Image: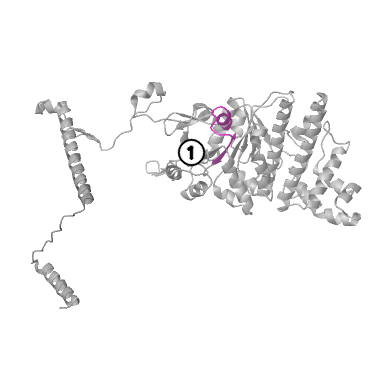
């Protein structure tokens, strides 16, 4: 009989036995004991270990049973056994849902006896109060200056705030503004596009500067607060410092004018045009009609100077004659004319209507309100925001120069850069200019708070290099505050600043919309509104979750009410 025929017979026999349930007793083969002494020893030790474990478990169970006082009581006095959800048995009152136990906050000396029911908190209670620490239930405090120079949590006084709209992102900014004013810092909102911070700054006794069509003007050729201190430095005998400030003023005016031209043109200026602007500004500086104690020139004066074709400008553009010069400067003149009579309207056409003064009597807070500019006028909005940032940082630098010269006390500032994505996407070169500002926070003695919605806002830039630079703002920030974001955004953010899996899941859960309430027939607030995660450092370590809590004064003053126009609709 062949091997194949034997396999067929065995298969048919197995099939028949499975149907008729008749079987032939299986012949068990006995394995001869192993003659290897090492194997026998291993098997013997394993069997002894299992037997010893069973005996230890039985002994422990018997010991617990003997120590239980209920075992020595009569049956009618024995208490019901305690399970994970309550007392077992009839009348035991087992709970289907276990309530959250009460929590208390105490020092390690007071709470040391409660171990292991203690949760440690490494985040110090230093800085502006925001609300509740969701890990410990205690008070959560944070602001960039206190975290950098008092608590030593990070080395750069800056933070980046991300979050979806209507989830409380602006409320965190307003709490930071109020906290900075309370600590004798000067919060400076460079460009408030929605007027969200006007009320809190006004209630703090601060200054409101309004810009827009028919609201106010900003002269990009003005000396600004930095130029206004030149005479004061000269009178104090600091001629060397006055000359240095004059060069800085010239550099700022040139940078601001170039940026506005590039925003209007939506392309970069050529090298010849940049050289021409620098030379024209130096000629205006030497003009006796304009000086630190008189009105500065306006863009119309610059246009008249370029059109007059002075010899210094003809030589600067390397033109052989005036006809070639006119051809070279024609595109630049068209751009300058558009600044005063184009898409940007008359905002940059005249003298500055309300200059910033941080020297004589600085206000406790400053807000530049540009909410009158419609959201559809993106070019004007971006140009005004960029001009406000340059002018604002110039005023802050002027205050520091006087402090270094011993002519004024040292002051600290909190610069709020809201709607960051609008300026970054305004035109070529904007990312590089803002990048230079974010690298000088410690040198300028200014804390920086940058605010935008999502990482996608930074990825909409045209050039890949600009996208990488913009993402570097997040990486270089001292701290990252993240509100409700979808999971896709958290994955992109994790590629820049690593988050733990638990933190990613927590932040993503905050973006869940609120449930529908059948009693009021309205949708409840989102569960993640007001919840944020503070992430410090670039290591994959847990962040600190917190929830903002409004004080009675904030509620009474309606600082955080952003739907005031819909109050009548909600009441009806």
Label 1, residues with CA under 10 Å away: few <14, some 14-19, many ≥20: many
Residue 567 left/right relative to 181:
left
Give percent across and percent down for residue 479.
54, 37
Quadrant where the image shows the N terminus:
bottom left
* Residue at x 10%, y 63% (from the top left corner): 27
Tag 1 residue: 533
In the rendered structure, which segment of residues is drawn in magenta? Answer: 144-161
Pinpoint residue 459: horizontal percent, then vertical percent. 58, 51
For the point 82% across and 27% down, the residue is 234
Q: Is residue 219 visible?
A: no
Horizontal arrangement in the rendering, residue 401 relative to residue 316 (left or right): left
User: Does residue 413 appear to the left or right of 152 in the view shown?
Assistant: right
Residue that protrudes farthest toward the top in the picture: 110
Q: How many marks?
A: 1
Q: Residue furthest bottom?
A: 1
> What x and y, as percent, mark residue 179?
56, 28
The answer to which of 150 and 4 lies nearer the viewer is: 4
């Amino acid at each position: 009989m062949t091997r194949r025929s034997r396999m067929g017979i065995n298969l048919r026999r197995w099939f028949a036995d499975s149907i008729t349930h008749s079987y032939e007793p299986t012949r068990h083969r006995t394995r001869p004991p192993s003659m290897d002494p090492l194997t026998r020893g291993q098997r013997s030790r394993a069997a002894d270990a299992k037997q010893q474990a069973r005996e230890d478990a039985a002994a422990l169970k018997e010991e617990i049973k003997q120590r239980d006082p209920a075992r020595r009581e009569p049956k009618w006095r024995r208490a019901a056994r305690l399970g994970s959800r309550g007392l077992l048995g009839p009348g035991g009152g087992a709970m289907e849902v276990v309530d959250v136990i009460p929590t208390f906050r105490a020092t390690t000396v007071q709470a040391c006896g409660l171990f292991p029911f203690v949760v440690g908190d490494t985040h110090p209670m230093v800085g502006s109060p925001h609300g509740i620490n969701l890990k410990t239930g205690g008070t959560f405090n944070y602001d960039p200056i206190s975290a950098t120079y008092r608590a030593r949590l990070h080395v750069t006084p800056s933070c980046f705030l991300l979050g979806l709209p209507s989830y409380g992102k602006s409320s965190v900014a307003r709490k930071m503004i109020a906290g900075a004013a309370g600590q004798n810092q000067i919060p400076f909102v460079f460009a408030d596009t929605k007027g969200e911070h006007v009320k809190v700054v006004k209630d703090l006794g601060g200054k409101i500067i309004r810009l827009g069509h028919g609201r106010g003007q900003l002269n990009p050729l003005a000396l600004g607060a930095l130029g206004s201190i030149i005479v004061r430095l000269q009178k104090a005998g600091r001629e060397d410092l006055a000359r240095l400030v004059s060069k800085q003023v010239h550099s700022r005016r040139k940078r601001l004018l170039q940026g506005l031209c590039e925003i209007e043109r939506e392309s970069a200026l050529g090298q010849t045009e940049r050289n021409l602007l620098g030379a024209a500004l130096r000629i205006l500086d030497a003009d006796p009609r304009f000086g630190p104690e008189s009105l500065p020139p306006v863009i119309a004066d610059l246009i008249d100077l370029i059109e007059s074709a002075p010899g210094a400008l003809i030589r600067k553009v390397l033109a052989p004659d005036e006809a070639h010069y006119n051809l070279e400067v024609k595109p630049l003149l068209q751009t300058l004319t558009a600044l005063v009579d184009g898409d940007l309207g008359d905002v940059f056409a005249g003298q500055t209507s309300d200059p910033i003064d941080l020297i004589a009597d600085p206000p406790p807070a400053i807000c530049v309100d540009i909410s009158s500019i419609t959201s559809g006028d993106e070019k004007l909005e971006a140009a005004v925001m960029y001009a406000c940032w340059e002018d604002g940082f110039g005023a802050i630098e002027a205050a520091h120069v006087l402090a270094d010269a011993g002519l004024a006390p040292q002051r600290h500032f909190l610069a709020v850069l809201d709607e960051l994505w609008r300026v970054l996407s305004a035109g070529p070169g904007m990312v590089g200019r803002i990048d230079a500002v974010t690298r000088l926070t410690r040198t300028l003695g200014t804390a920086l708070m940058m605010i935008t919605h999502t990482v996608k806002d930074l990825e909409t830039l045209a050039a890949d290099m600009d996208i990488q630079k913009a993402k570097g703002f997040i990486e270089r920030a001292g701290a990252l505050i993240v509100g409700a974001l979808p999971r896709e955004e958290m994955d992109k953010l994790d590629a820049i600043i690593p988050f733990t899996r638990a933190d990613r899941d927590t932040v993503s859960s905050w973006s869940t919309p609120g449930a529908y309430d059948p009693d009021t027939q309205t949708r409840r607030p989102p569960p993640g509104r007001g919840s944020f995660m503070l992430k410090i450092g670039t290591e994959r370590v847990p962040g600190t979750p917190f929830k903002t809590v409004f004080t009675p004064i904030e509620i009474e003053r309606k600082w955080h009410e952003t739907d005031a126009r819909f109050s009548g609709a909600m009441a009806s």
